[in-house]
Amino acid sequence: MFAHALNAYLQVQVPGVAERRITDIFKPMGTPGYAEREAALFTIGVTAVIFVVVAGLIVYTVWRFRRRPSDDSAQEPPQVYGSNQIEAAWTIIPILIVFVLIGVSARVIAGVENASPPPKALKVRLIGHQWWWEVQYPDYGIVTANEIHVPATPDGQRATYLELTSVDVIHSFWIPELAGKTDLIPNRVNYAWIDPRVPGVYVGNCAEYCGTQHAQMLLRVIADTPENFKTWTEQQQRPAENDPQVSDARNVFGSLACVNCHDIRGTPSVGKFGPDLTHLMSRRTLAAGVLVNDTKNLRAWVDDPQKAKPGCLMPSMKLNDQQLEQVVSYLQSLK
Ligand code: CUA
């Protein structure tokens, strides 16, 4: 129901920004975020008027009835007891205001939650882990982590519908510019949807306290042009690169316990506990958005994950320098 207003609003915004990193709920780039902003602005407007009226009356009263030199301090001002009109007014008007606010919130919540997926909608399963996000594309057979690639959808027809669940504790999905928060709850599936109208990177964060590294459980939605999204899905569907130049390094990796937790499709490494690494190098970040994915950070992360993210479930494997170099060079072959 907000599609028309959103289109008009987006025309005034700066379209075509390649990379957006501001997480501003007042600059929505998708329908749910836009609907929620409208409700927020309305509520802020109503409460601002109430504030001005109440604060204004207080200031007026303090000033108008201040003590004057001529006042007789022994004598109280005239006391007024009871007024049916005033009592009725301050009971009925707030009740009406509360009902209007309930109505507006309910309308927006229902509008967002009851929206049915358009036929071309993309389906994504998002699974919360302490402290990272597993991202599955059931229709494509793709598994990745922490970065959700979706097609940007200027007309809203290629929206992405998310199934949200968790393997451990409650997490919460939140991409401020695209959609408000929805919890990821173990043994339950919740739903959310996003329709980024403009290509770019939309940054979000886990929004439900889930343990020591809750604040470092970042999430990115990368809205690609349709062509780039197609290229990305084709690349992600392939098994891992089998680069002969790193066959020694691959053997070293295969001999380590890393394989118990990480899946690298097409290799004997089939663990499911940690993020899928099949195309690790296609991701911009490591450790759920905490580190830029470059050689220095990758080496530091593999060497001792507890430095960047104390308490995280990936242990330091206590590799010697040579093993570390080989693991890093193997991981960097996973394009
Ligand atoms: Cu996951 Cu907070």
Image (cartoon, rainbow, N blue to C red):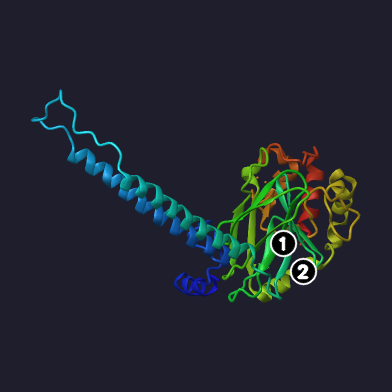
Q: Is residue 44 left or right of residue 240?
A: left
Q: Secondary structure at mark 2?
A: helix
Name the residue nearer the viewer: 32 or 273.
Answer: 32
Give the amino acid at mark 1: Ser
Measured as percent of width and height from the top left, residue 170 is found at 70, 45
Helix or strand or loop: what does disc 1 sit on?
Answer: helix
Residue 162's x, y, as percent?
70, 61
> What is the crowding at mark 1: few (fewer than 14 residues within 10 Å), some, or many (at least 20)?
some
- Residue 22 appears in the rendering: no
On the image, numbered disc 1 is attached to which residue?
A: 282
Q: Are marks 1 and 2 in contact (CB under 8 Å)?
A: yes
Q: Residues within 10 Å of mark 2 (few under 14, many from 20)?
A: some
Q: What quarter of the picture does the N terminus occupy?
A: bottom right
Number of numbered labels in the structure image: 2
The residue at the point 72 percent across, 74 percent down is 230
For label 2, the residue is 235
Asked if 2 appears above or below 286 in the picture, the reply is below
Q: Amino acid at mark 2?
A: Gln
Indicate the quadrant containing the C terminus: top left, top right, bottom left or bottom right. Answer: bottom right
Which residue appears at 86% of the width and 53% of the height?
Answer: 250
Does residue 192 lie above or below 68 as drawn? below
Q: Earlier in the sequence, mark 1 or mark 2?
A: 2
